[in-house]
Image (cartoon, rainbow, N blue to C red):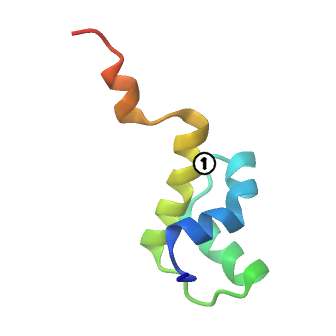
Amino acid sequence: MQRNSAWYIATLVDRNITINRQIKPKEIRERAAIYHQFQRVPYQPAWRARERPRDILDGDEGASFSLIPD
């Protein structure tokens, strides 16, 4: 398993994202460095890690639009 994958990072910071859904990818990168000793988490995996739990909690935007009748 790759340590910089969005899925892996999301599992580590899932609680933080649940508490603060507006958390910035920069904060996720900082928390990964402080609490999990990841020195260089790229921005894109941090952003994706934030989006995964948000999609589960809030629902997928594309799926919501498909529910609107034509």
Percent from the top left, x then y, of residue 25? 54, 65
The quadrant in which residue 67 appears is: top left
Kindly identify which residue carries mark 1: 22
- Locate residue 33 relative to residue 1 in the image: left or right: right
> Looking at the image, which is closer to me, 13 or 21?
13
The answer to whether one can see residue 26 in this image is no
Number of numbered discs: 1
Toward the viewer: 28 or 57?
57
Residue 12 drawn at (x, y percent): 70, 68
At horizontal 78% and vertical 78% (from top left) the residue drawn is 35
Please give left or right for residue 37 compared with residue 60 in the image: right
Image coordinates for residue 55, horizontal then vertical, percent: 52, 42
Q: Is residue 11 above or below residue 33?
A: above
Residue 22, visible in the rendered structure: yes
Whether 68 is drawn above or below 20: the answer is above
Q: Secondary structure at mark 1?
A: loop
What is the crowding at mark 1: few (fewer than 14 residues within 10 Å), some, or many (at least 20)?
few
The residue at 45%/36% (across/down) is 60
Pinpoint residue 44: horizontal percent, then vertical percent.
42, 70
**The C terminus - image quarter:** top left
* In the image, residue 40 above or below residue 32: below
Could you tell me which quadrant the N terminus lies in?
A: bottom right
Q: Residue visible at 57% across and 82% down? A: 3
Q: Amino acid at mark 1?
A: Gln
Residue lying at the far front in this picture: please name it: 1
Residue at far top of view: 69
Q: Residue at x 47, y 70 (%)?
A: 45
